[in-house]
Amino acid sequence: MKKRNTDKKVNKVNKVVLAYSGGLDTSVILKWLQDSYGCEVVTFTADIGQGEEVAPARKKALALGIKRKNIFIEDLKEEFVRDFVFPMFRANAVYEGEYLLGTSIARPLIAKRMVEIARKTGADAVSHGATGKGNDQVRFELGAYALMPDVRIIAPWREWDLLSREKLLRYADQHGIPVDFKKRKGGAPYSMDANLLHISYEGGILEDPDFEPEESMWRITVSPERAPSRPEHVTLEYRRGDIVAVNGRRLSAARVLETLNRLGGRHGIGRLDLVENRYVGMKSRGCYETPGGTIMLKAHRAIESITLDREVLALKDDLMPRYARLIYNGYWFSPERQLLQTLIDESQAPVNGTVRLKLYKGTVIVTGRSSKSDSLFDPTIATFEDDAGAYNQADAAGFIRLNALRMRIAAKQRRRKARA
């Protein structure tokens, strides 16, 4: 098997850090790196809540000749939610009106840790298993370059000719790479990505955007039709825009999301079928389960509705699509995203209080919100009853006439033209 890249510089790679899951693709990549580059390989396996045991990755890496000191398996769930998911939800970020960015937000953390391990081990390159068609190649590599400008990046899918599952399996057989029987026989019919925020499903029959996926595809949510017939009430406590307690129980960031995933999942909340515009230019159909994130988005907007100034909230809404695109397109470590984050985080200082929700058959219903110290809701002004002079309704006349002035001038001009 030959590499597409004939650049002689490839032989200068001494050590590479590989984002390694232990699955078919990355196991083949590991062996391919050893054979094609003749370099030492360091494996990095991140546990960000994908729901699968990551410990077997160590055994598989050892079987492929990786030194024990070069195998990194790390639990990053708390950092993932605290430093990536929560900041994103402070911005209410949604891509193209629907997608809660579950895959996008995980990539900068993996890139960050890969670079840190590269520095620690003296590696001069990093490698990933993202294809040349997807967004993840962009996210991994922009993150790596932002943090380690001179790093060498090896993207096998852009170099080799193993461009089908059959070729990957043949290569695995030739080199004694163990492959799970279920994978060899087809396994899951979709390409899946999972972390503590979501599960995504792509490929296979889902490439037909008119195909309705079978119920058995979904992993963490029940169908709304089969959800409990009684609603469940949930209370969330906020501090500076982040959830710190669920139903009165103080929880870490990761535990907050785990709890909301469980609650939302059993009530059929958070399913999405979407055709999105990929960064590389094509349209792609994917299905997503994001139960906890769906609850978080609804609740965060509810607490902001009573604690943020009208124009501050409007400015955040104006900036949100730009912020979401930055994350989707891999610019988490860019100066513009960091600048926006500073502005967003500053806006969250008064976002403190509680939100009460009702979860019922795929829906999240806000039933109440309160903030003892930061609420801008003044019932003495907003009341429909006698406000005892708190608000002079006559003031509205001048405000309306001033705002109507330009439209009145335009209307008079149209009449003049019509008479001419």
Image (cartoon, grey):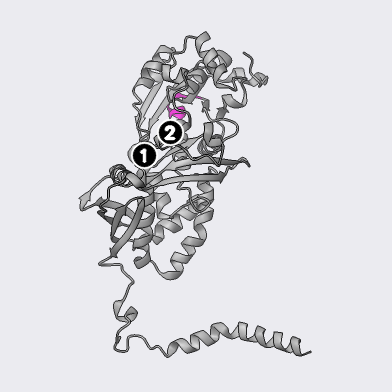
**Residue name at image x 55 percent, y 45 percent:** 276
**Residue name at image x 51 percent, y 15 percent:** 31
Can residue 203 be seen?
Answer: no
Q: Residue furthest right?
A: 420
Residue 199 vs residue 249: left or right? Answer: right
Judging depth in this view, the residue of 48 and 76 nearest the camera is 48
Q: Is residue 156 above or below residue 389?
A: above
Q: Is residue 24 magenta?
A: no
Q: Is residue 225 above or below residue 44?
A: below
Q: Which residue does the numbered mark 2 point to in the structure image?
A: 113
In the image, which residues are magenta?
115-123
**Residue name at image x 52 percent, y 55 percent:** 321
Q: Amino acid at mark 1?
A: Leu
Quarter containing the N terminus: top right
Q: How many marks?
A: 2
Residue 64 vs residue 2: left or right? Answer: left
| Chief SS of the magenta region | helix
Q: CA distance from mark 1 to mark 2?
A: 17 Å
Residue 279 vs residue 247: left or right? Answer: right
Dividing the picture into quarters, in which one does residue 50 lie? top left
Judging depth in this view, the residue of 168 and 352 nearest the camera is 168
Numbered disc 1: secondary structure: loop
Query: Residue 177: image x %, image y %?
Result: 46, 13
Dividing the picture into quarters, in which one does residue 154 lie? top right
Numbered disc 2: secondary structure: helix
Q: Which badge, 1 or 2, comes first in the chain's sequence?
A: 2
Query: Residue 359: image x %, image y %?
Result: 30, 53
Q: Which residue does the numbered mark 1 point to in the structure image?
A: 196
